[in-house]
Amino acid sequence: MLSSHKTPLLALLAAIAVALLAGCNDTLRQFIVPVPQPAGNPAALGNAVVLSTNPSGNGSTMHIDVSGDTLAGTLTVGPNPVFLGKGGSNVYAINGDGTITAYVALNPLSGIVNTVTSSPGTSLPVAGGTSSSTNFFTANSASDDSSVVSSAVQAITAVIPLPVGSQPVAIAGSSANSKIYIVNHGNNTVTVVSTTDNTVVKTIPVGAQPIWGVMSADGVDVFVVNQGDGTVSVIDTTLDIVITVIPVGASPNFAFYDPNRERVYVSNTGNNTISVIKADGINLGVTPQILPTLLANITVSGAPVSVAALNDGSKVYSALGNCPAGTNHTSLAANLASCNGTMVSVVDAVGLRETGTITVGSGVVSVDVAGDASRAYAVAAHAGTVADIRVATGKVITFPAPQQNLSCSNPSSCPANITQTPFMVRVFP
């Protein structure tokens, strides 16, 4: 209890404090101290890069910002581009004149764009890929060789010769392996190349007319799509031998490796199916060996040309292009006029069934997904559009392809019927 002689003093001090706070003729105000709240959870940084060809001149790459669903920039590449490659953080657009346009994917407006010219004697490349070396390797189909594009100087520093008639069409590699695997359509082989010194390590026989290859995220296995006999050859990269051959669907054309579920999804253009290969738990050191197996063949609502799985393992998206059987990324430019599909298939990766389709426009030929599993992107070539699909809601935001004349800025003088033709999408990183 306070002593009685202190009470007047405390009252006086309280009165002085009130006077100081109120000031002359001011009303006493309460002071509110804000309490910091948890920050939001923005989407991961990324760009969906769309490659377009231009009937009136050079093609382009259009960048869509993943987190903002906005156009991040458009760059001019070379004439009649045929393939969009990823090499680490770099975009590599392979052009119809043999040049390669290279730049950093997440900085499209930096102004630093390199044009890589082909080495004398090499043919026009049709595809490309990279490994832990970060250099970009091209598949030069007509000249039976592979060019090495140095990521450090953005120039061709070596050419790797292959046997006559090899007809390379695809490169399989990953950042976890110091080798690349060149898929040779002409002689039914895969060439193994060490990327430390760019020398040929081995040639491996595979199935008939191999058309595509994809490496597992850990770099331990390569899955080669054999279009001629409807199989996938699985190569162990330690032994560099085929450990099993898996029957899939008719005229398979493309494969996508899902690192979350450790599966391979194969699009089969001949019988409107997507094959699911179980690739987890592979073990060659036990008896019997644990090998990849076919988990399911999923019927979809059209002929799939491209397929991609969300990183969370929940869904798979496929572009139902209805192209001629066997069409894939290396033959897409030639067959594009015949691709009249309009839908993207949505597949439940748990139930292994198609749960619906999304109509995005005529000529849907390529699909890819964002690294944060929030969006899927589909290119409709004949419609001249790119569909940005929100995974959670199915809502679609449509982006028009660039105008044929990139300097045209007045919408009234740039009608939609003179846009470029988009045909391939890759999401970075």
Image (cartoon, rainbow, N blue to C red):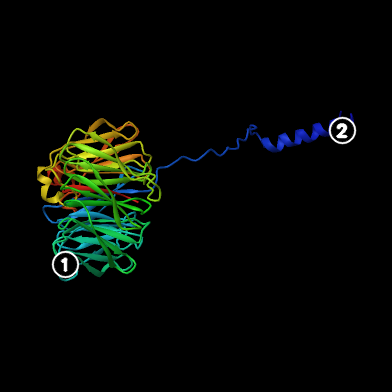
User: What residue appears at the point 63 percent right and 33 percent down from the top-left corner?
Assistant: 30
Cα distance in 3D space between marks 1 and 2: 100 Å
Measured from the top left, where is residue 237 in percent x and y?
33, 56
46 vs 121, left or right, is right
Vertical placement of residue 197 versus 10, above or below: below
User: What residue appears at the point 60 percent right and 35 percent down from the top-left corner?
Assistant: 32
**Residue at far front of view:** 287
> As shown in the figure, which amino acid type bears the numbered disc 1?
Thr
Residue underneath mark 1 = 122
10 vs 73, left or right, is right
Vertical placement of residue 346 versus 285, above or below: above
**Label 2 element class:** loop
Task: Point out which mark residue 6 bears.
Answer: 2
Can I make out residue 82 in this image? yes
Measured from the top left, where is residue 419 in percent x and y?
15, 47
Sequence-first tag of 1 and 2: 2
Q: Nearer the viewer, residue 380 or 416?
A: 380
Task: Point out which mark residue 183 bears.
Answer: none
Vertical placement of residue 200 versus 41, above or below: below
280 vs 17, left or right, is left
> As shown in the figure, which amino acid type bears the numbered disc 2?
Lys
Check if mark 1's residue and mark 2's residue have beta carbons within 8 Å.
no
Measured from the top left, where is residue 423 in percent x and y?
19, 47
Measured from the top left, where is residue 256 in percent x and y?
28, 46
Can I make out residue 113 in this image? no
